[in-house]
Image: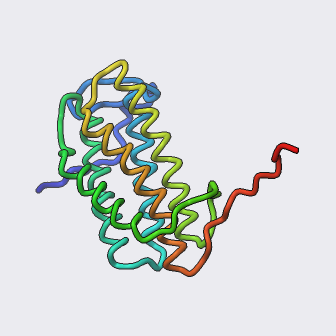
Amino acid sequence: MGNRLSKIYTRTGDAGTTGLGDGTRVTKDSLRIVAMGDVDELNSIIGLMLTEPISTKIRDCLTRVQHDLFDMGGELCMPGYVMIKAERVTALETQLDEWNDTLSPLKEFILPGGNRAATYCHLARTVCRRAERQMTTLNSHEKITEISLQYINRLSDLLFVLCRILNKEAGVPDVLWQNTHKPT
């Protein structure tokens, strides 16, 4: 593979537009670009999680997710292009079920917190949900793949369970929401 980025700045975006992978120019605040940015931000937060001391199994899962998110960014960048396959959704579901089966049932809502890796994971989960909302909005205007929408939805579920797993592995309890507004 040759040099993909031989020059970092091109000045072509100085007027508020950017190029998609198919050469189309769009505004930098277009729905597609915002969705791409949310997916990229999510990938960056997962990279932050990977700087923490976590198990090899979690590290391997998150590394694969990073590659999937990069592929998803490619799909978003090139309208009509498909990179995320149904097998990746199934893989997330399998991992989610495996981890969730080791956790005690939740009886209360949990708040973001616990150890640092779990807190980063909660941040990733919220950005994932924002990316999903943005992709859903984009899909109502310009069709994107159904598999990518399924993937991002399942990923937010996986991240929620992973927050609990990270706390469990660190021996730190989840932070439970305290309902202070109980009816009298």
Rendering coords of residue 31 (x, y %): 42, 26
Quadrant including the C terminus: top right
Q: Nearer the viewer, residue 124 or 17?
A: 124
Question: Does 19 appear above or below 97?
Answer: above
Q: Residue furthest top?
A: 141
Quadrant including the N terminus: bottom left
Q: Nearer the viewer, residue 21 or 135?
A: 135
Q: Is 184 left, or right, of 97 in this rendering? A: right
Rendering coords of residue 55 (x, y %): 39, 79
- Residue at the spot 28% in from the left edge and 23% down from the top edge: 143
Q: Residue furthest right?
A: 184
The part of the image, by quadrant, that contains residue 27 is: top left
The part of the image, by quadrant, that contains residue 21 is: top left
Rendering coords of residue 68 (x, y %): 27, 52
Question: Does 150 appear above or below 103?
Answer: above
Rendering coords of residue 94 (x, y %): 28, 59
Q: Nearer the viewer, residue 87 or 140?
A: 87
